[in-house]
Amino acid sequence: MFDWIQHLTDLLIYDVFRMQEGTHLTEALHFFLYDTVKILILLFSIIFLMGIINSYFPIEKVRNFLSRNKLYGFEYLMASLFGVVTPFCSCSSVPLFIGFVRGGIPLGVTFAFLVTSPLVNEVAIGLFIGLFGIKITSIYVVSGILLGTISGIVLQQLKLNSLLTPWVQEILANAQHEEERFVIEKTPFIQRLPVIWEETKTILKGVTPYVIIGIAIGGLMHGYIPEGFFEKYMSSDNFFAVPIATILAVPMYSNASGILPVVQVLVAKGIPIGTAIAFMMAVVGLSFPEAMLLKKVMSFKLIGIFFGVVTICIIISGYLFNIIL
Amino acid sequence: MKTIKILGTGCPNCKKTEAIVQSVVAELNLNINIEKVEDIQDIIAYDVMSTPAIVIDEKVVIKGRVPKPDEIRALLKEVCCNDKNTSCCEPVVSDEQCCGESASAQDKSEPCC
């Protein structure tokens, strides 16, 4: 599928720039050009596709669905699945949280949505396909959905309602299940397209600099770090590698799109994939600024429990991947 | 006087939205209140789940994205020009300035502002 980019890069490097084959610099530049073009094309496609899906699954529809239907335990999985197709900007997390609480959706189900939505987002998926291929991407997506589901169930069991801020508890007490069916706007696809297109451009513009810097750093490392360099330090027998990688990743939030290309090179140079996935999940899924925003609706204790449960789930899945893959 | 509200907790997208609204209002020379709603409890009173959102006449017209200046222009013209009882074009400006070519091209006997 991406052969043509390979040919194009070859042509540019060897014929136009007349660079010598086999040197570190040539390899690094080749890697950089090839990856940048491939990943930007993938990102564009996935963001656009997700934009179309999201246009038909607005957040109000998700809330109505979860609020109205009795799902017999499947509501956690459903919330988690909706999280995939309904990306939200972290500054919307508070209104979203309140909207869910008000609709009578259990706290655990809301958490399932809040965990999966940032974890399995369009930018991460696009980058994953470009960097690691379809197989690893599917594993990442499926485990992200399960992780949200399980975290939601666990958090529900902990009965945390009393740790919400008082005004949210009041809303919780007056919560009502939605009665009316959500009427989907009958906007024709053609009319939705300009909005989706604009959104795609905005998102792509926002992440492109990080992606390019990430790939540039990755390109340099790719050319200069010897194969298997990290194996001595971070092999899968090293019991502490997964938790350390996860905890290191929690404070890194805004640069996820720049960090993933670097991690790909680390994997190529010998870091086990499970450790790397755990690291990336923590980078993408847990953001410190989001935690600060949630302070308006939750006590610090609840935010701590929320992040703690998700972190533990990420660490466990990291170990699982190292065993299975 | 009409009021246009921007709902948002202060994230970069909300600030962008506010700047766009301000520039359009200035450009059209409208006499309309611009209000920034940052308090979360006030925001959720509009039952909005994604920010930034824009409220005109207490009605949510855009939510969850940064609008284009053209959208705001169209919305404001609709509010100011279709409703003859409102006074968002004071101080009185020419039809063209307020309602654009569409209004001046249409019925001259019924000035919009």
Image: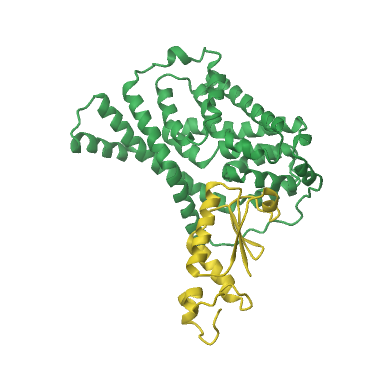
Chain colours: A green, B yellow
**Image coords of residue A290 (percent x, y):** 60, 38
Residue A251 sits in which quadrant?
top right
Q: Residue furthest bottom?
A: B109
Residue A306 sits in which quadrant?
top right
**Image coords of residue B81 (percent x, y):** 56, 75
- x 47%, y 67%: residue: B27
Image height of A283 relative to B72, above or below: above
Q: Nearer the viewer, residue A289 or A93?
A: A289
Q: Is residue A74 visible?
A: no
Q: Is residue A35 visible?
A: yes
Q: Is residue A36 left or right of residue A17?
A: right
Q: Nearer the viewer, residue A202 or A315?
A: A202
Pick the quarter of the image with the N terminus of chain A: top left
Image height of A279 relative to B76, above or below: above
Q: Residue furthest right?
A: A173
- x 31%, y 36%: residue: A33
Image height of A48 relative to A247, above or below: below
Residue A22 sits in which quadrant?
top left
- x 51%, y 42%: residue: A122
Image height of A309 relative to A52, above or below: above
**Image coords of residue B78 (percent x, y):** 56, 71
Q: Is residue A173 left or right of residue A279?
A: right
Q: Is residue A132 left or right of residue A6?
A: right
How many marks overall? 0
**Image coords of residue A269 (percent x, y):** 40, 20
Q: Is residue A300 left or right of residue A278?
A: right
